[in-house]
Image: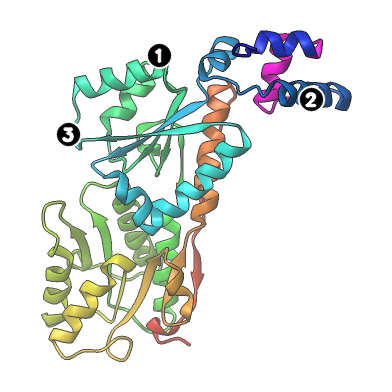
C-alpha cells in the first residue's frame, strides 16, 4: 500500500476529514465513543502518521508555537532553573493541546529585519509566539501588536497597555518581604532590582518604595542595587560598597543568583549571614527549600502552563485576561527569624 493520507482514514472510518482532524488535534469531545473507537482502529490498521502539512491544510494551523529567547542561548533555556521550570509548564500545556515548540534565539538589539523574519514565521511556520526577557517599551511586542500576531509574554507589560502577559507579582512580593523585615526591627534594608531597564526591576523598585511609604519610613535610593548588563561583578561591587558604608544595611532582598555576591562581599569584610546580615531571596532552586533561606517562591510551572494556555486561546480567537501569580514568603534561617 502507498502512503496513507487523511482522506483515506476518513473514508474507511466513514467520517469527514474535519472529524478526523478534530480527533487528531484532541478536539473530539463531541464525538461519540463509537466514532472515536472507529477512527482509532482505522489509524492503527493503516499505521497512519498525520503529516504537518495535512493538519495545516485542514485547520489553518501549524500546531507550532515559537518561543523567543531574546539575548539568551538555547542552553540557558534548560540550564537555568527559572526557564527550565517555566518551560516544563509550557510543555505540559503543549502536550495537552497537541502543540510543538520552535525555539528562536534573537539578538538583544531590535531590528526591522528581525521583525520581518518573525512575521514570515507567523505566515506558515508558527501560530504565535511566547516571549522571555522582555523590557520596558519592547519593540518586538509593539510589532506583534501592530501586525495582530498572537503572542504572550512572561513578565508584566501593563505599562505598554497590552493584556498579553503572565508573570509574577514582584511588587507585592517585595512589599511582603519588607514588611516582614520591618516587623523584626530590621529597618535599613537594601534590595537588588535585577538588570537595569528590566520590567521585573521596575516592579521590585515600586514595591520597595511603596512598603517604606506605607510604614512612614524613609527609603534610601542608594539601597536599590541595579545590575549592569555588561558588568558581571556589578552586584558584588554594590553590595561591598553598601556593607563598607557608614550606614550598613541590616538586611538584603535579592535573587538567589546574587546571593553569592552578597556572601563574598560580607566575607571580605569579616561579616556573616545571618549573624550580621539578614537576607530574603527570590528563589527558584530546590536547594532553597533546605530551611537555610527565607525566600519568595514563585509557582513557575503554573506560570509556564498559564502562559501557553492563554496563547492557545488567543490563537483560537478567544479573549484572555492578564495574569500575575503571587509570591509566597517561605521562612528559613537567613532572615534570623526562625
Q: Callout 1: few (<14), some (14-19), or many (20+) C-alpha neighbours within 10 Å?
A: few
* Mark closer to the chain start, 3 or 2: 2
Q: Nearer the viewer, mark 3 or mark 1?
A: 1
Task: Describe residue 73's horizontal placement relative to residue 88 as left or right.
Answer: left
Tell me the CA gap for discs 2 and 1: 35 Å
**Residue 221 shown in magenta:** no
| Residue 234 x %, y % | 13, 63
SS under mark 2: helix
Using the image as rendered, state which of residue 4 and residue 147 is in the foreground. 4
Return the mark for residue 85.
none
Task: Give, as a single range, the part of the protein colored magenta.
Answer: 13-29
SS under mark 1: loop
Tell me the CA gap for discs 3 and 1: 23 Å
Q: Is residue 322 visible?
A: no
Tell me the CA gap for discs 3 and 2: 52 Å
Residue 144 quadrant: top left
Residue 223 quadrant: bottom left
Q: Which residue is mark 1?
A: 123
Q: Nearer the viewer, mark 2 or mark 1?
A: 2
Return the mark for residue 109.
3
| Residue 165 x %, y % | 45, 38
Q: What scheme was used to colour the molecule?
A: rainbow
The reply to whether the C-beta atoms of the residues labelled 3 and 2 are less than 8 Å apart is no
* Mark closer to the chain start, 3 or 1: 3
Using the image as rendered, state which of residue 200 and residue 302 is in the foreground. 302
User: Is 126 drawn above or below residue 240 in the view shown?
Assistant: above
| Residue 106 x %, y % | 25, 34
User: Is 19 drawn above or below residue 136 in the view shown?
Assistant: above
Q: Callout 3: few (<14), some (14-19), or many (20+) C-alpha neighbours within 10 Å?
A: few
Q: Which residue is mark 2?
A: 41
Q: Quadrant of the N terminus?
A: top right
* Mark closer to the chain start, 2 or 1: 2
Amino acid at each position: 500500500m502507498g502512503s496513507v493520507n487523511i482522506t483515506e482514514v476518513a473514508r474507511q472510518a466513514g467520517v469527514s476529514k474535519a472529524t478526523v482532524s478534530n480527533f487528531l488535534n484532541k478536539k473530539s469531545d463531541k464525538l461519540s465513543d463509537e466514532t472515536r473507537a472507529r477512527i482509532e482502529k482505522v489509524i492503527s490498521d493503516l499505521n497512519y502518521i498525520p503529516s504537518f502539512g495535512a493538519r495545516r491544510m485542514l485547520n489553518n494551523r501549524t500546531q507550532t508555537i515559537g518561543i523567543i529567547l531574546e539575548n539568551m542561548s538555547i542552553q540557558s533555556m534548560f540550564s537555568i532553573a527559572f526557564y527550565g521550570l517555566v518551560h516544563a509548564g509550557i510543555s505540559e500545556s503543549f502536550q495537552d493541546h497537541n502543540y510543538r515548540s520552535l525555539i528562536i534565539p534573537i539578538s538583544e538589539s531590535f531590528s526591522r529585519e528581525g521583525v520581518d523574519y518573525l512575521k514570515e514565521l507567523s505566515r506558515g511556520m508558527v501560530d504565535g509566539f511566547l516571549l522571555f526577557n522582555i523590557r520596558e517599551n519592547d519593540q518586538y511586542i509593539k510589532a506583534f501588536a501592530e501586525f495582530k500576531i498572537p503572542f504572550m509574554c512572561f513578565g508584566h507589560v501593563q505599562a505598554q497597555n497590552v493584556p498579553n502577559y503572565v508573570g509574577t507579582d514582584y511588587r507585592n512580593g517585595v512589599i511582603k518581604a519588607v514588611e516582614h523585615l520591618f516587623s523584626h526591627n530590621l529597618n535599613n534594608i537594601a534590595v537588588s532590582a535585577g538588570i537595569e531597564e528590566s520590567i521585573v526591576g521596575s516592579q521590585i523598585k515600586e514595591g520597595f518604595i511603596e512598603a517604606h511609604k506605607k510604614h512612614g519610613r524613609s527609603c534610601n535610593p542608594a539601597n536599590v542595587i541595579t545590575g549592569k548588563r555588561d558588568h558581571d561583578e556589578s552586584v558584588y561591587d554594590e553590595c561591598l560598597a553598601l556593607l563598607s558604608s557608614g550606614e550598613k544595611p541590616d538586611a538584603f532582598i535579592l535573587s538567589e543568583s546574587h546571593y553569592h555576591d552578597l556572601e563574598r562581599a560580607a566575607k571580605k569584610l569579616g561579616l556573616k549571614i545571618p549573624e550580621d546580615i539578614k537576607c530574603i531571596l527570590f528563589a527558584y532552586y530546590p536547594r532553597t527549600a533546605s530551611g537555610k533561606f527565607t525566600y519568595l517562591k514563585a509557582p513557575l510551572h503554573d506560570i509556564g502552563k498559564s502562559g501557553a494556555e492563554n496563547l492557545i486561546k488567543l490563537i483560537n480567537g478567544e479573549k484572555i485576561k492578564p495574569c500575575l501569580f503571587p509570591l509566597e514568603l517561605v521562612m528559613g534561617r537567613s532572615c534570623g527569624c526562625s
